[in-house]
Image: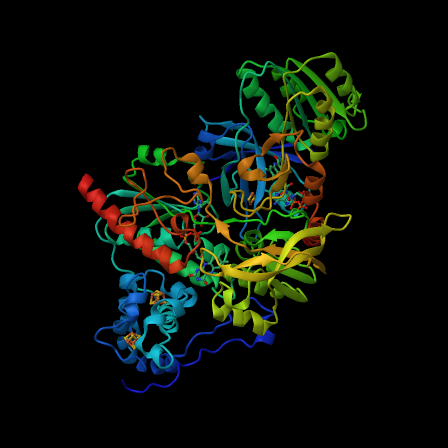
Amino acid sequence: MNRILTKRTLTQNVKLFEVEAPLIARKAKPGHFVILRFHEKGERIPITLAGSGPKRGTITIVFAEVGKSSTQLGNLEEGDEILNLLGPLGNPFPLDNYGTILCIGGGVFIGALIYHMKALKEAGNKIVAVLGSRGKKHLFFVEEAKEVADELYVTTDDGSAGLEGLVFLEDLLKERSFDHVFTIGPTSLQKEVSEMTRPHGIRTTVNLFPIMVDGMGMCGACRVTVGGETKFACVDGPDFDGHEVDFDELISRMRVYNPQEKIAMILYQRVV
Amino acid sequence: MAARGPQVEMPKQPPEERVDNFDEVAQGYTEEMAIEEALRCLTCPNPQCIKGCPVDIDIPGFIDLMKQGKFDEAIKEVKEKNALPAICGRVCPQESQCQKFCILGIKGDPIAIGRLERFVADWEQEHGVEVPGNPDNNGGKVAVVGAGPAGLTVAAELAKLGHDVTIFEALHNAGGVLTYGIPQFRLPKEIVQAEVNYVQKLGVTINLDAMIGKLYTISELFADGFDAVFIGSGAGLTRFLHVPGENLNGIYSANEFLIRTNLMRAYKFPEYDTPINVGKIVAVIGGGNVAMDSARSALRLGAEKVIIVYRRGREELPARLEEVENAEEEGVEFMLLNNPVRFKGDDLGRVKQMEVIRMELGEPDESGRRRPIPVEGSEYLIDVNTVVIAIGQTPNPIIQRTTEGLETTRWNTIVVDEETMQTSIEGVYAGGDIVSGTATVISAMGAGKKAAKAIHEYIFKKS
Ligand SMILES: Cc1cc2nc3c(=O)[nH]c(=O)nc-3n(C[C@H](O)[C@H](O)[C@H](O)COP(=O)(O)OP(=O)(O)OC[C@H]3O[C@@H](n4cnc5c(N)ncnc54)[C@H](O)[C@@H]3O)c2cc1C
Ligand SMILES: Cc1cc2nc3c(=O)[nH]c(=O)nc-3n(C[C@H](O)[C@H](O)[C@H](O)COP(=O)(O)OP(=O)(O)OC[C@H]3O[C@@H](n4cnc5c(N)ncnc54)[C@H](O)[C@@H]3O)c2cc1C
Ligand code: SF4
Ligand code: SF4
Ligand code: FES
């Protein structure tokens, strides 16, 4: 069960797994995530789906090696089995024909963005896509995005792939009209996008990933303030109206274990 | 009535030692102690104690066998009625159940029924567990949602009757609150696992990481060939205070705090990967067993000062007296008749202070306890580094959200027929905390037994 069928290295620290999980694959939709654990002392790691193959009985995940757990996860090989795999969790993205939809994804979430785009395309939307990352060497799936999007912009923080930052988006939003904006990626990116679309009054769906433990609506670790109310991202989300989210609180909550995580990583690096 | 001496005390780890470890506090009787305590029992011909046991254990029967040192037969007698005796012997609120009715309690100490039950269960673990032969599979297929005490009991009972039972549990370990909520020092997880293993040996299949409502809906379970479904999904959703500053860092729900500590073993970080933040001063809000468990865990996680903040008085504390005393012995402080009204943070978003208001008690409310009323203008600030909110739990929400036609109350508990535990959907039964709201392990098991009986009859009527 939960066997890794394919492993790909997408960038220096981003890996893709295709995992045999027929029961989850049968139900998986863009916007869903899974929680996995790969050894008895391990933590529960939430990861967004970046694809599913109901016929093959597989799901695809794309993850960045940022700390101890994700680095260890990246050391698993094809044929290995993942000890625990729970899903699909969260609510799928509401698929609809919105008209022209602007899809903005960044960092490791470009995989999940393309999964969304494929489904949105099938639902009849015209897709304008933006892929963002730190620099050229952190980009992946540009060709895949080109195939699905009607129009594609690629931008990086350092300008190494053409566009630099999100400034161009200001003009795009001014000149063109979009019926919906969807953004997934680093929380700072989602915040920036929401700020930019707010004055234009374009409905903006964000996909949040606060710290989670159970992922089933019990613990409240994942609570976010949306429109002044406390919501649990795992069962009420992970999609929310970006204009209603208290991003500063969210960003602060996501950093809460940074000191401990650093210790864990240092100890881990000493061992390997 | 023959005169009887006091109860045989059970050895405990001394408070100053136990606050530094997560090992079990109460260490159990020796054989000699168990026999001595058993000998106090009058073997009443019309035993009152049984009235207080929701699963009808033949209490004088098993105690009588203990008197003769026949521990192997005693445990069989217990297991006739209770598949999880090592757990119940530890966590049943015996003082308000079986022991409350013991005739000896009128003039002196009741029999320590829970401790005796625990002893024979542990004795069996040490000497090898005997599993009754599986009856031929002659029944139906039953799906059970949740591997807490309610679900495990339904499963064990139906398996013994020859049904093919599969439990679907969302978490990566079975046991429900027994595993993720009640701390190691009160209920070692090895004990829970041993009882879960016993249920599996009865022929029950347990599918972990399987959330019903997501992986399968209830109606899909029927489509997959199950004849009946039991929902035992529990009440694990923490209530929050809904006061300003509640989302600051360092403020945990009791559930998150206990899940990190027990299920994920954050007390062994970084050997285990899941972290927890426990500052110098910890305030636990609430006065029930969950609050006591959180406070005592916080001490063991290294807090210098742990304060229970409760809005009513000492008399009204809903926790078991034994747990309050244990907490006090270990140095937990009590700030009674106080209630938080807001939390203040530092510039990194971490909780730093808590504003509380003093309360006074008015007339009794619906719960029969005196209603706490805030004293206007009495607010003041105290320093805190970590806060745990333990003011109650509400039902887990996923099943109700994904099952059409399932009748629920306004508290989101599931409505059932009290005799059969059947829900508004034919063939779907429910029991435990998901029906009653937070109650006890043994009442969840009692509900499980009732449902098992009804499910058995339902399947036979159908076929
Ligand atoms: C719904 C959801 C979907 C996610 N999808 C993806 C994905 O598709 N690809 C991907 O690379 N990452 C994803 N993440 C983040 C991923 O779970 C974390 O990167 C991972 O847990 C980090 O573990 P670590 O020990 O390697 O790093 P750590 O050093 O422990 O942490 C690094 C950072 O990861 C975040 N993090 C740590 N623990 C958790 C946790 N339990 N839950 C959530 N975030 C945590 C924190 O913000 C932390 O600062 C998702 C998170 C959530 C909640
Ligand atoms: C900290 C704490 C201390 C306590 N101390 C005591 C005590 O000392 N004595 C006592 O008698 N009682 C105590 N209780 C109460 C007691 O634990 C509960 O009443 C009892 O566990 C209820 O049993 P249950 O089977 O109904 O639910 P639970 O034990 O809550 O089990 C429900 C299970 O269902 C699973 N689940 C939920 N939704 C789904 C889904 N959709 N699909 C699959 N699985 C699902 C959950 O993960 C969980 O494992 C305590 C409770 C807590 C929280
Ligand atoms: S199961 Fe609980 S109530 Fe029943 S005899 Fe044992 S301790 Fe008493
Ligand atoms: S009531 Fe007390 S003394 Fe009588 S049988 Fe029960 S436990 Fe023994
Ligand atoms: S992760 Fe626990 S409630 Fe969402």
Q: Which of the 4 image quarters holds residue B220?
A: top left
- Residue A81 spot, x, y in % from top left: 50, 42
Examine the rendered structure and indicate whether residue A238 appears above or below residue B8.
above
Compared across the picture, whether B281 is left or right of B183 comes to: right
* Colouring scheme, one of rainbow, by chain, secondary structure, one colour: rainbow
Please give the name of the residue rendered at 32% of the width and 42% of the height, measured from the top-left corner. B423
Examine the rendered structure and indicate whether residue B371 appears above or below residue B108.
above
Compared across the picture, whether B209 is left or right of B336 comes to: left
Q: Which of the 4 image quarters holds residue B41?
A: bottom left
- Residue A197 spot, x, y in % from top left: 71, 23
- Residue A106 spot, x, y in % from top left: 69, 29
Report the quarter where the C terminus of chain B lies: top left
Please give the name of the residue rendered at 72% of the width and 18% of the height, measured from the top-left corner. A153
Please give the name of the residue rendered at 78% of the width and 48% of the height, measured from the top-left corner. B347
Q: Nearer the viewer, residue A140 or A257?
A: A257
Q: Nearer the viewer, residue A112 or A71?
A: A112
Examine the rendered structure and indicate whether residue B376 appears above or below residue B430.
below
Please give the name of the residue rendered at 44% of the width and 33% of the height, measured from the top-left corner. A22
For the image, the number of numbered tags is 0
Is residue A57 in view?
no
- Residue A150 spot, x, y in % from top left: 64, 13
Report the quarter where the N terminus of chain B lies: bottom left
Q: Nearer the viewer, residue B381 or A62?
A: B381
Is residue B394 in view?
yes
For ligand 4, the image quadrant comes to bottom left
